[in-house]
Amino acid sequence: MVKGTSFFSGFLGLLFGLWVVTLWILSSIPGQDIELPPFPGADKVAHFVYFFIGGLLFASVIARTRHWRGWKLTWTGLFVIALIGALDELHQLHTQGRSGGDLADWMADSAGGAFGALMIGWIYARGKNRGPQAPSGAVAHRD
């Protein structure tokens, strides 16, 4: 294990927990109190971006703690974020002035989360393909 990995993994886990709590708080705001930019689909963009961040955080935690890569990481990220998105839509059904149960919102959530998880998978795959590198200024030796 790399020195500092446990601290950073814990920090990412904390950020993901804060993301979930913030989602709950945002979903508890009555519909009439929400102001989105005045362009068509602004709510879908907001869902995509917020869940993209959640997908990044969740996949980062899993990649660092479970050392999962590739499709296992991506599918797990998609499943977990899609589940959270579905629970969010269910929660909004019980929030005043919110529609909840919106399939298009859930799809935007899932797509954002999947894209975030894919990005983390891509970043970790690039790092793995580069292999160990000599420190700056060091001379690499071949045996």
Image (cartoon, grey):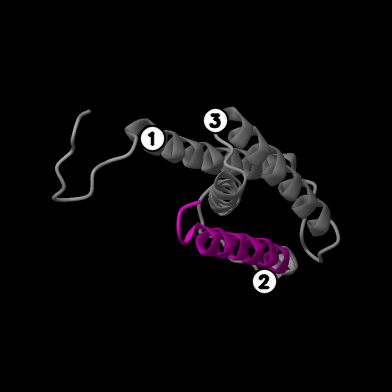
The disc placed on residue 33 is 2
Q: Which residues are magenta?
A: 1-26
Element at label 1: helix
Q: Please tell me whether the stretch drawn in magenta is mainly helix, strand or loop.
A: helix
The residue located at (59%, 28%) in the rendering is: 71
Compared to residue 122, the image places residue 32 above or below, namely below
Compared to residue 115, the image places residue 23 above or below, namely below
Amino acid at dot 2: Asp
Label 2 CA crowd tier, 10 Å (few <14, some 14–19, many 20+): few
Compared to residue 9, the image places residue 34 above or below, namely below
The residue located at (63%, 31%) in the rendering is: 72
Element at label 2: helix
Q: Evaluate whether residue 131 shows in this view.
A: yes
Amino acid at dot 3: Gly
The disc placed on residue 81 is none
Residue in the foreground of this view, choosing between 74 and 41: 74
Label 1 CA crowd tier, 10 Å (few <14, some 14–19, many 20+): few
Question: Disc 1 designates what residue?
Answer: 126
